Amino acid sequence: LEQPVLVVDPSPEMLQPASKREGVLTLEATFDDFISSHPHTISKYNKFVFNGCILLFPNLEASIAAFYKLLKPGDQLLIVQYNILIWKENLRTSWDSLNELEEFHKRAGFCVERGKESHSHSYSREKYFILYVIAATQH
């Protein structure tokens, strides 16, 4: 990992393992609280990873647009999400497809690259473990 690393999560239980790693700072906050209360902290970093958390955003498009405004040119946002779209009928999200998720980034101003889907072969139901990666760069 590049140093320093800041891990933000609303759950102390999720932060606890990260806090044990060298060079890792932790902050207990929701994403919306983080971007509204810590813009000075965001300016210290140039790469941001959302790992498996996009279901927690009540209005993901608005959150992505707000986050874009805090970034410097060249800063990157990486979204990593397992294939939750197969459970979509049981979920309430502010988006309906991976293409729509990409469009949120583009409308905010990001340059978007979709990573190759990666399949887990250690599970018999590998369709549940497809990993989607979207890399977005502020320009």
Image: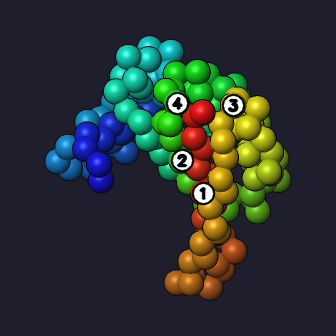
Percent across and percent down for residue 16 are 27, 44
Percent across and percent down for residue 78 are 54, 47
Question: Which three-letter amino acid code belongs to the residue tagged 4?
Answer: Pro
Question: Which three-letter amino acid code belongs to the residue tagged 1?
Answer: Val
Q: Is residue 25 visible?
A: yes
First in residue order: circle 1 vs circle 2: 2
Alpha carbon distance from label 1 to label 4:
21 Å
Residue 22 in the figure: left or right of residue 34? left
Question: Which three-letter amino acid code belongs to the residue tagged 2?
Answer: Leu
Percent across and percent down for residue 59 are 71, 29
Query: Which dot, 4 or 3, sits closer to the camera?
Result: 4
Q: Is residue 58 visible?
A: no
Residue 99 lies, with reference to residue 43, above or below; the image says: below
SS at mark 1? strand
Alpha carbon distance from label 1 to label 2:
7 Å
Which residue position is annotated with label 3?
109
Q: Residue at x 62, y 85 (%)?
A: 124
Image disc number at residue 133: 1
- Residue 14 or residue 138, whichever sits in front: 138
Percent across and percent down for residue 41 are 36, 22
